[in-house]
Image (cartoon, rainbow, N blue to C red):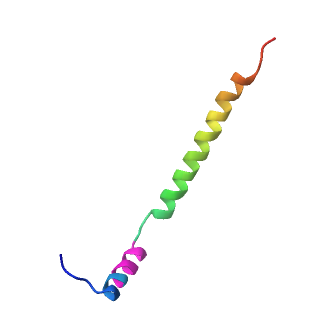
Amino acid sequence: MEYTPRAAWLAEAATAAEQQGPGNLFRVVLIVMLVGCALTAWFLLRGYKRKDD
């Protein structure tokens, strides 16, 4: 394994960070999906809480 100086490693990391692509879109899609699943679960499970007397 070759030794890479820290300055070169940081420069490569900064370049890679600029070329991320759809990272933010993917985060938004995941958050919306999780919130949607939670709301769907709440909607479906709230009917089981009612007591039929």
Q: Residue at x 46, y 63 (%)?
A: 23
Residue 2: x and y, percent?
Answer: 19, 80
Q: Nearer the viewer, residue 2 or 41?
A: 2
Which SS does the magenta portion mostly show?
helix
Residue lying at the far right in this picture: please name it. Answer: 53
Residue 36: x and y, percent?
Answer: 60, 43
Residue 46: x and y, percent?
Answer: 70, 28
Residue interval drawn in magenta = 11-19
Q: Residue at x 52, y 51 (%)?
A: 30
Q: Nearer the viewer, residue 18 or 53?
A: 53
Left or right placement of residue 31 versus residue 8 in this view: right
Residue 48: x and y, percent?
Answer: 69, 22
Residue 40: say if magenta. Answer: no
Residue 17: say if magenta. Answer: yes
In the image, residue 39 above or below residue 29: above
Please identify the quadrant where the N terminus is shown: bottom left
Q: Nearer the viewer, residue 36 or 1?
A: 1
Question: How many numbered marks, from 0 up?
Answer: 0
In the image, residue 40 above or below residue 30: above
Q: Residue at x 37, y 80 (%)?
A: 15
Q: Residue at x 36, y 84 (%)?
A: 11
Please identify the quadrant where the C terminus is shown: top right
Left or right placement of residue 49 versus residue 32 in this view: right
